Image (cartoon, rainbow, N blue to C red):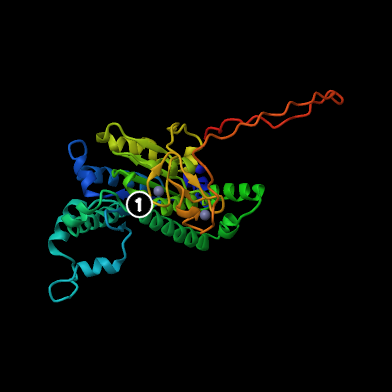
Amino acid sequence: MNAVDASEHYESSANEPAPSLLTIILDTNPRAWALLEDQLPFSKALANVLVFINAHLACNYTNEVAVIASHTQRATWLYPTHSQQTLSRRRDADGDIQMNGDEQHTTASSSTHANMYRPFRTVEEQVTENVRELLASTNAADVQSTTSTMMAGALTLALSHINRRSMTWAETHGAVNLDAAHAPTGSSAAAVSSSGNANMGLQSRILIISVSSSTDSAHQYIPIMNGIFACQRLHIPIDVCKLSGDAVFLQQAADATRGVYMALTEPQGLLQYLMMAFLPDQRSRKHLILPSRVDVDFRAACFCHRRVVNIGFVCSICLSIFCEPPENGDCLTCGTHLEVGDYGSRPAVIARKKKKKKARLNGSSVAGTPTPAGTPAP
Ligand SMILES: [Zn+2]
Ligand SMILES: [Zn+2]
């Protein structure tokens, strides 16, 4: 019977899995891309990312995508952009909106994209147009002034978009009680809500395609870490695809949120890496062996100079990190006066008291402090 009217097909579509929202943060720092020009030009990388986006949209017709550019001076939306911006772009010299859009633009796009699936076409047109505009608005002074990228701002934009989409999705489908999922509940209640989330809510994840060295972005340490902790709490994995340079904080982001971290040795194969490692969503990942990263760089940046430090001083009240004892012993963050003492001296070693041997009661041993086990692998 099913072969005739496909009745099973329609019944199963009622409880089909929830869509997944992929938010891509693309590092568009021109200086870093220029260094990578021989191996992977920016235009080719962008084309690869667009193919990857199409693959994500093709997995499920309700899947969504968002693209954010993390530029040198600002973080900006590449997709979706508001229709207002699109309209203002199409105005002619008199300020009138052309009814058929820019003539050259339409003829070029209609001939090449006439048979393209509409969501693919919308994403491609908006992303390429916005990238072109972003790069055209960047001048030499902007590029020379900094080598870092606005990762904290981009992460915040991604989080706010995910939050908005999740709330809209929950309102229209009534499937997930967001407040219950995010409220600080007991461990059992949290486990229930997170498993419920995994099956019914909007599945969101963030993919960061990074080229700039993030040691330079140590001044963004606190906002980046706040973004990471927010993702951790909301069960949003941060995947990191590192094309060049060194990413101290991004390794921690992927590690804390159980995302995938990959530093590409062959940037030419970007598309293959994206397809093989970053295309599966959270539901599929349960059944896959993911590329794991063992040596995570857990260094932090000091709050006083934003330097990445190996060993530092931690305020016992607010847990701020300093590379050297603060002046007069006053914490720069909370203002508490701290007794630093003579920190340079060797710590005194106190001999441990010998345990008195006691007769065991009924053969049960008196358990001492359990030996600390190693950190469980993720
Ligand atoms: Zn410092
Ligand atoms: Zn403090």
Q: Residues within 10 Å of mark 1 (few under 14, many from 20)?
A: many
As drawn, is 305 to the left or to the right of 140? Answer: right
Residue at 27% in and 42% down? 48
Please tell me in which quadrant of the rendered image residue 104 appears: bottom left
Q: Nearer the viewer, residue 148 or 228?
A: 148
Q: Amino acid at mark 1?
A: Met
Q: Residue furthest right?
A: 362
Residue at 46% in and 56% down? 332
Residue at 54% in and 57% down? 336
Q: Nearer the viewer, residue 342 or 64?
A: 342
Which residue is labeled 1 in the image? 151
| Percent position of residue 27, x then y | 29, 48
Query: Tag 1, which secondary structure?
Result: helix
Q: Nearer the viewer, residue 318 or 23?
A: 318
Relative height, residue 133 to residue 288 (above, below)? below
Residue at 62% in and 46% down? 191
